[in-house]
Amino acid sequence: MCLLRVGGVVMKAPAPIIVRVESLTAQYGEHIILEDIHFDVHRGEVFAILGGSGEGKTTLLRCMIGLMEPLKGAIFIDGKNLVQTQGEDRLAVLSHMGVMFQSGALLGSMTLLENVRLPLEELTHLPKEVIDAIARNKLALVSLSDYADYYPAEISGGMVKRAAIARAMALEPSILFLDEPSAGLDPITSAQLDQLIVELSKTVGMTIIVVTHELPSVFAIAERCILLHDKKIVAIGNPMALKQQSENAWVNQFFNRKPEP
């Protein structure tokens, strides 16, 4: 742990920046979705991207994982600008990321073990037995060792999400993106998934970026967050601090679940 002394007080120094978004503007057709977005994510933290429906959360995620080109701006992943990379250099940047999509996106014709093995088979030249060992290890990390031979249709929605996280971690990414991990889950299953995210952050040391609008999950897992509204970032910081201390009326309304007056 790196410590700083400020005015006689010892404080924990912030971790290095692993993701930096600068001046990002994104649009669909002629419609601007996000405009001049700036923020940093520190290595090892759980960081949430929040906003109401249609506020640009998914658009921002798509830009950050390379599925959509922004109109302008830069996205630095470990110091490399994803927007300017091509070919092998782009693949090298993308290799730092693992993504769990909202539905889980598991292949229904494959078992959980086969789903987790897939990226290793497609993108590495590791021996079959090594690939199998890695895949089983990832399933163990999400408490699914006993379900390796099950198909996605044979397990619950929460287990599908956990298996998708295992697959996203197969290539040992330094950044894990989770798209609406709690969507469609009951409160108990959602709480269990929150606990898994926190445990992965602590034990694996992975940077986790979560796109969500589920406030209970945000308060349970996120160290910092941004809140998107009207194409901009209207708040950034610790979610509980924003809930309790923000002087912005809309931010206060969002975090405290207040209806329109």
Image (spheres, rainbow, N blue to C red):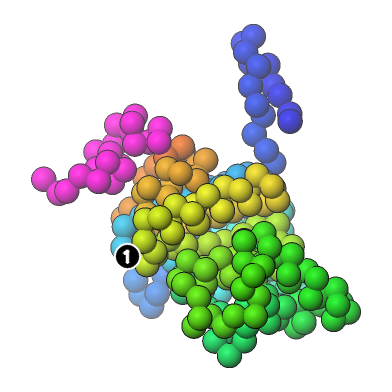
Label 1: which secondary element: loop
- Give the image location of residue 259, x and y in percent: 17, 48
Q: Residue at x 65, y 44 (%)?
A: 202
- Give the image location of residue 102, x and y in percent: 46, 70
In this rendering, position of residue 185 left or right of residue 82: left
Q: Residue at x 59, y 70 (%)?
A: 163
How many numbered badges does the structure rendering display?
1
Residue 54 image-quadrant placement: bottom left
Q: Residue furthest top?
A: 8
Q: Is residue 103 above or below residue 73?
A: below
Q: Give the crowd class for mark 1: few <14, some 14-19, many >=20 residues within 10 Å.
A: few
In this rendering, position of residue 259 left or right of residue 57: left
**The magenta stretch spans residue 128:** no
In this rendering, position of residue 144 left or right of residue 156: right
The magenta region covers 240-261
Indicate the amino acid at tag 1.
Gly
- Give the image location of residue 199, x and y in percent: 61, 48
Q: Residue furthest left?
A: 261
**The magenta stretch spans residue 246:** yes
Residue 22 visible at all: no
| Image quarter in which the N terminus is found | top right
- The one nearer the camera, 35 or 137, is 137
Q: Is residue 121 above or below residue 189?
A: below
| Image quarter in which the C terminus is found | top left
